[in-house]
Image (tube, rainbow, N blue to C red):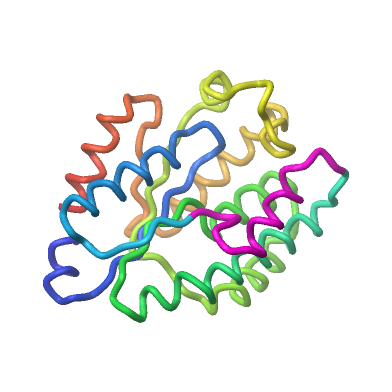
């Protein structure tokens, strides 16, 4: 996939998804380093954040507060809209590839499956924030929530990371359900493997 798109001077839009502690951010950074080494024009971005407004929203979402589920949905979507308008869409328009840590599927998994918000409402808001832009490929770092919780520093957990295992079970199952609906776009990886092994799988697939 990567070779053909680069030959055609077409950017590739890659998304990493997974529950907290799955290692998706690590894999996104490792892939970005490989792209840099191969002189492939790209940007590495994360959600929520990476714009001035997005970072302020990230702080609100991370704080220990009583933010309601619907408010949480709107805040994530507002940060996403800023990132799309200021970073993602302009980069793709300039033939720059995207490596993105989280996208609309996090909203479906966390706010839909995890918070039990209405899926139709989530889809409508996601489409407004992204104008329906779909990635070329999504790598899902799949891991048992009990194992992922052991990877995180319990003294540094934010509001969402502090949710119980039962919440993350629902989010994980949500991700797997989403992936099953469009299997041609999703690559499910065993996140319990070593970071280097996972990175090799990702690079081999793209290569």
Q: Where is residue 122 drawn, in percent x and y?
A: 67, 64
Name the residue rendered at 46%, 57% in the picture: 45
**Residue 161 versus residue 140: which sits nearer the camera?**
161
Name the residue rendered at 59%, 56% in the picture: 49
Q: Where is residue 73 drawn, in percent x and y?
A: 73, 59
Classify 90 as above or below 54.
below
Question: Looking at the image, how many numbered discs can be counted on the residues?
Answer: 0
Classify 24 as above or below 93.
above
Side of 45 relative to 58 (left or right): left
| Occupied quadrant, residue 161 | top right
Work out which quarter of the rendered image holds the N terminus and state it.
bottom left
Name the residue rendered at 33%, 25% in the picture: 193
Side of 118 relative to 170 (left or right): right
Residue 61 colored in magenta in the image: yes
For the magenta stretch, what is the residue range?
Answer: 46-65
Name the residue rendered at 67%, 59% in the picture: 76
Classify 117 as above or below 86.
above
Side of 163 relative to 138 (left or right): right
Q: Where is residue 120 drawn, in percent x and y?
A: 68, 67
Q: Where is residue 97 drawn, in percent x and y?
A: 31, 66
**Residue 16 versus residue 59: which sits nearer the camera?**
59
Q: Residue furthest right?
A: 66
Side of 34 relative to 193 (left or right): left
**Residue 107 versus residue 185: which sits nearer the camera?**
107
């Amino acid at each position: 996939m990567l070779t053909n798109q680069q030959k055609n001077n077409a950017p590739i839009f890659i998304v990493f998804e997974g529950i907290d502690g799955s290692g998706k951010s690590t894999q996104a950074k490792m892939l970005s380093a490989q792209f840099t080494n191969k002189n492939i024009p790209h940007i590495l971005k994360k959600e929520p954040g990476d714009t001035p407004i997005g970072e302020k929203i990230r702080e609100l979402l991370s704080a220990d507060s009583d933010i309601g589920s619907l408010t949480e949905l709107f805040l994530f979507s507002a940060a996403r809209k800023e990132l799309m308008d200021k970073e993602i869409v302009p980069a793709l328009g300039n033939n720059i590839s995207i490596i993105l840590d989280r996208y609309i599927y996090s909203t479906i998994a966390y706010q839909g499956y995890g918070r039990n918000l209405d899926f139709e409402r989530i889809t409508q808001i996601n489409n407004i924030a992204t104008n329906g832009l779909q990635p070329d490929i999504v790598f899902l770092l799949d891991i048992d929530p009990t194992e992922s919780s052991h990877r995180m520093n319990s003294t540094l957990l934010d509001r969402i990371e502090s949710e119980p295992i039962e919440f993350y079970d629902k989010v994980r199952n949500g991700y797997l359900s989403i992936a099953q609906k469009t299997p041609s776009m999703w690559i499910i990886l065993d996140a319990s493997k070593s970071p280097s092994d996972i990175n090799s799988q990702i690079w081999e697939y793209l290569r």
